[in-house]
Image: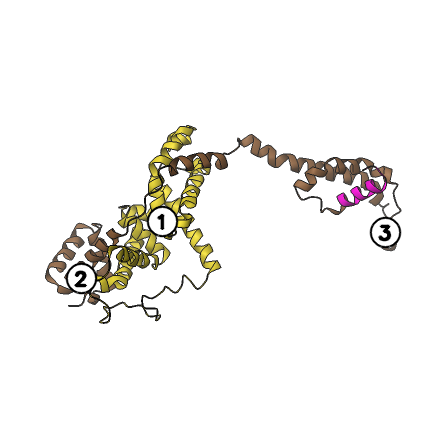
Chain colours: A brown, B yellow
């Protein structure tokens, strides 16, 4: 009698029966079927055989010193900084960037503000050049924080590049 | 684990000492790749170390550990499949003709005959490796770790009924793959 005759639901019950995971009444039904029905008996035998084959597959034992090596390595690479250090690490660059931005905006504000009531054509005219000295504070700040900008990839900001360029041309850098 | 969670670093050493063998075996059976075995075992404990704050004592530590291990292995398998999309979808057939023999083959030797234990082990590991991921995890946890359906359900984040179905399908697939080696 073919073990394949069992439907999916029957096979599920048989598999759970082998694992001892069936409720009592279902387990009794399956037990009876395994005794009385050749297809169930054959399926049970095959499951048993597969289970015995799985016993052959043994995992290799880990090297004796693996646990010690893992402990040491995990401590080295997995150490977490205290919360306040992590907060400072994130907040400090942001605060510095904000300060730079604020300084740049404040020094540039008079250049870009326009009196009310001017028409669009007037507003679209090029702004007069401001002497380099007016933005010297912001430029110096950018230069002083060059490492910071490089670390945090802010150097691509056009204003910063422009500031550095001005300082270089003026011989400050 | 609770001691370690409270800041006792020496408890971590004990935890690693007690569970390294278990994780090592699990990773080996999930991935069957001795080359990555130690690195991945270490990665499991690194994740434990880094996520200790998220551990809730309501869950058994072993369940949490198995879940971390299973997720890590799933990620590795996903990456492998992205890199080699065909190699894992089509398992090698024994005879190299592209057909999987689900029924006894008259051309082949009698079940088990001529196969030494090492060869048989390879057949078994190949059969397990060819199972879909969640069936493989389910059968490994059930067979080799002796986990109940409830515990497996927690690891796989599914119901016990789903585990029952997974294990049944895994066994059916294994039976089909190994039936030619079963003695009549």
The answer to which of A99 and A120 lies nearer the viewer is A99
Check the image and report above or below for A170 versus B88: above
Q: Residues within 10 Å of mark 1 (few under 14, many from 20)?
A: many
Q: Quadrant of residue A148?
A: top right
Residue located beneath label 3 in the image? A123
x and y percent of residue A104 in the render? 77, 40
The answer to which of A1 and B40 lies nearer the viewer is B40
Mark 1, secondary structure of its residue:
helix
x and y percent of residue B128 in the render? 31, 56
How many marks do you count on the picture? 3
Query: Can you name the residue that lies furthest to the left here?
Result: A36
Dot 1 falls on which chain?
B
Discs 1, 3: same chain: no
The answer to which of B34 and A160 lies nearer the viewer is B34
Q: Which mark is residue B28?
A: 1
Check the image and report above or below for A99 versus B25: above
Which residues are the magenta region?
Answer: A160-173
Residue A135 visible in the current orientation = yes
Residue located beneath label 2 in the image? B183
Dot 2 falls on which chain?
B
x and y percent of residue A154 in the render? 69, 43
Name the quarter where the N terminus of chain A is drawn.
Answer: bottom left
Q: Quadrant of residue A4?
A: bottom left
x and y percent of residue B129 in the render? 34, 57
Q: Residues within 10 Å of mark 2 (few under 14, many from 20)?
A: few
Q: Quadrant of residue A89?
A: top right
Q: Tell me the CA gap for discs 3 and 2.
A: 93 Å
Mark 3, secondary structure of its residue:
helix
């Amino acid at each position: 009698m073919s073990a394949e005759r069992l439907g999916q639901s029957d096979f599920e019950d048989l598999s759970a029966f082998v694992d001892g995971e069936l409720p009592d009444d279902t387990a009794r039904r399956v037990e009876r079927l395994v005794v009385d029905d050749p297809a169930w008996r054959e399926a049970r035998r095959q499951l048993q055989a597969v289970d015995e084959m799985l016993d052959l597959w043994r995992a290799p034992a880990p090297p004796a010193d693996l646990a010690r090596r893992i402990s040491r390595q995990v401590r080295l690479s997995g150490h977490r900084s205290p919360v306040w250090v992590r907060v400072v690490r994130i907040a400090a660059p942001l605060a510095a960037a904000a300060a730079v931005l604020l300084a740049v905006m404040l020094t540039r504000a008079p250049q870009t503000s326009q009196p009310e009531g001017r028409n669009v054509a007037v507003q679209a005219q090029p702004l007069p050049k401001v002497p380099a000295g007016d933005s010297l504070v912001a430029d110096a700040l950018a230069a002083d924080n060059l490492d910071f900008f490089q670390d945090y990839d802010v150097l691509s900001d056009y204003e910063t590049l422009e500031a550095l360029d001005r300082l270089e041309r003026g011989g400050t850098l | 684990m609770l001691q370690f969670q409270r800041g006792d670093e020496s408890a971590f050493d004990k935890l690693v000492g007690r569970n390294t063998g278990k994780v090592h075996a699990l990773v080996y059976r999930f991935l069957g790749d001795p080359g990555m075995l130690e690195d991945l075992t270490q990665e499991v404990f690194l994740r434990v170390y880094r996520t200790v704050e998220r551990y809730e004592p309501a869950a058994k530590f072993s369940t949490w550990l198995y879940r971390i291990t299973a997720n890590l292995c799933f990620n590795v398998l996903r990456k492998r499949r992205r890199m080699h999309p065909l190699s894992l979808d089509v398992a090698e057939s024994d005879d190299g003709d592209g057909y999987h023999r689900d029924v006894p083959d008259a051309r082949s030797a009698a079940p088990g005959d001529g196969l030494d234990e090492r060869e048989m082990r390879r057949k078994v590991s190949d059969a397990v490796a060819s199972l879909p991921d969640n069936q493989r995890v389910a059968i490994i946890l059930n067979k080799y770790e002796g986990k109940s359906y409830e515990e497996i359900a927690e690891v796989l984040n599914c119901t016990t009924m789903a585990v029952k179905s997974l294990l049944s399908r895994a066994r059916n697939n294994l039976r089909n793959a190994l039936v030619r080696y079963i003695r009549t």
